[in-house]
Amino acid sequence: MQPIPFAEIQGLVDDHTAIVQWYIFNDCFRAFIITRNSQELPIWESSRQDLQDLEEWSYEYLLDYGTDKDKWRHQLASCVNLSAFIRVHLRFLTKFNLTIVIKD
């Protein structure tokens, strides 16, 4: 398997689409954004508090899923809150003239 060149990755998206790749580190999470025309690789970095909030949400979500399916089903609305959390933190994408769409 050969690495794919950056320009070839850019060719996979149209002018109103971005590829957002997330990485979670010990003290934050980061998003790398690839657009069709970007000359650089923009990197967004969360705050430590954002990471703690995300970890807390995921812990509670998985705990409920594994131990109390009824509670988990009734709290699926919290997934909407996670989507809103992500959407707020990706507002910087608007400088690339992109529309933010989170597909569940």
Image (cartoon, helix red, strand yellow):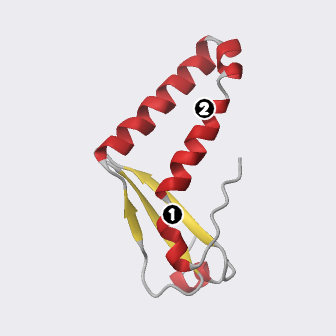
- Mark 1: amino acid: Arg
- Give the numbered dot on residue 91: 1
Q: How crowded is mark 1: few (under 14 residues within 10 Å), some or many (20 or more)?
A: few
Q: Which of 58 and 23 is in front in this view?
A: 58
- Give the numbered dot on residue 36: none
Does residue 4 appear in the picture of this structure?
no
Residue 64 percent across, percent down from the top left: 58, 18
Does residue 88 appear in the picture of this structure?
yes
User: To which residue does mark 2 refer?
Assistant: 78
Residue 76 found in image quarter: top right
Is residue 38 shown above or below 44? below
Instruction: Decide if residue 38 is on the left or right side of residue 51.
Output: right
On-image quarter of the N terminus = bottom right
Is residue 76 shown above or below 100? above
Q: Earlier in the sequence, mark 2 or mark 1?
A: 2
Residue 7 found in image quarter: bottom right
Residue 30 percent across, percent down from the top left: 40, 57
Dot 1: element: helix
User: What is the count of numbered marks?
Assistant: 2
Residue 80 percent across, percent down from the top left: 64, 39
Q: CA–CA distance between discs 2 and 1?
A: 20 Å
Residue 9 found in image quarter: bottom right
Instruction: Decide if residue 48 is on the left or right side of residue 79.
Output: left
Q: Which of 94 and 12 is in front in this view?
A: 94
Q: Which residue is drawn at 66% across and 31% down?
A: 77
Q: Are marks 2 and 1 in contact (CB under 8 Å)?
A: no
Is residue 61 shown above or below 71? below
- Mark 2: amino acid: Ser
Q: Which residue is drawn at 51% across and 46% down?
A: 85
Q: Which residue is drawn at 53% across and 51% down?
A: 86
Instruction: Decide if residue 12 is on the left or right side of residue 22.
Output: right
Q: Residue at x 57, y 47 (%)?
A: 84
